[in-house]
Image (spheres, grey):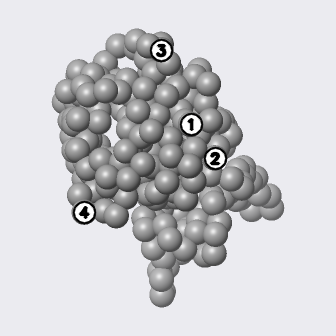
Amino acid sequence: MTDKPGIVITGGSGRMGQMLIRTVLDSDKARLVGVVERSGHAWVGQDVGEAMGGAAVGVTVTDDALEAFANAQAVIDFTAPEATLEFAALAAKARAVHVIGTTGMSEEQIARLEPPARHAVIVRAGNMSLGVNLLVQLTKKVAAALDEDFDIEVIEAHHHHKVDAPSGTALMLGEAAAEGRGVSLADVSDRGRDGITGARKRGDIGFTAIRGGDIVGEHDVLFAAAGERIVLRHMATDRSIFARGALKAALWGQNKAPGQYDMVDVLGL
């Protein structure tokens, strides 16, 4: 027996999934007790260590999420919105902490996390890194200090495999800027400029998404006024920072009251 929390990784074959698996296996504070993949995936039934091209680790990949979650104290989930909602319901049944790094969730999908959060801890964040969450707090403070003479633009860059835009982190930064200004992001968001768009509307918060190569994640928040610019920047060069943050969230959530939390809570910011 051990008092180290047991962790299940969903979507284990993906790049983040494999990084999360390695992070948990290397940790002296947690145990890998399960890896979940979709039904029919080639990894199902294999030892995950061997599936990843290494030595066996004693954990077999399964497509039965409920069975895997039943033996876990936490689930770390970087998958897709609808899959995440299914996992949230199952994690709540197992009373396991559900750490959600999935991006691209709609407001309606996020609202559907409320019922499972009544029964279990959910930690959801568009980005799990310490640096980005500090950047969010800085963005809020700078936006609060500057008036609408400063245009705000969130510029993000990611690898060419990323399927959603703006990134979850960009939206976190946009929400922080809007909160700092005391407005709703939905009312001032400016996206997808193309063609003759007319002049920029005063007070809008703009988004620009760049996709290319193997960029892990870069985010700038630009405050631009006549005669001066302020740029807040975070650059990620290794996605292991997200995996370490997610594991930290899974450990932090142990013995917390059911409810929805974010990385600001986890990091004490």
The numbered disc on residue 240 is 2
Q: Residue 187: where, in percent of width, then height? A: 38, 53
Answer yes or no: is residue 145 visible: no
Locate the N terminus and report the quarter of the image it occupies.
top left
Residues under labels 1 and 2: Cα distance?
13 Å
Q: Are marks 1 and 2 in contact (CB under 8 Å)?
A: no
Residues under labels 2 and 4: Cα distance?
28 Å
Q: Is residue 77 left or right of residue 218?
A: left
Residues under labels 4 and 1: Cα distance?
25 Å
> Which numbered mark, 1 or 2, is in the foreground of this view?
1
Q: Which residue is mark 1?
A: 25
Q: Amino acid at mark 3?
A: Thr
Image point 23% across, 21% down: which residue?
119
Q: Amino acid at mark 4?
A: Gly
Q: Is residue 55 left or right of residue 77?
A: right
What is the number of callouts on the image? 4
Q: Amino acid at mark 2?
A: Ser
Q: Nearer the viewer, residue 199 or 249?
A: 249
The numbered disc on residue 40 is 4
Q: Residue 14: where, in percent of width, then height? A: 46, 58
Q: Amino acid at mark 1?
A: Leu
Compare marks 4 and 3 and give the one earlier in the sequence.
Answer: 3
Q: Is residue 105 left or right of residue 160?
A: left
Image point 45% across, 45% down: which residue?
101
Answer yes or no: is residue 161 visible: yes
Would you call the spot at circle 1 few (<14 residues within 10 Å), some (14-19), or many (20 or more)?
some
Q: Which residue is mark 3?
A: 2
Q: Residue 197: where, in percent of width, then height? A: 47, 80
Residues under labels 3 and 2: Cα distance?
26 Å
Locate the C terminus and report the quarter of the image it occupies.
top right
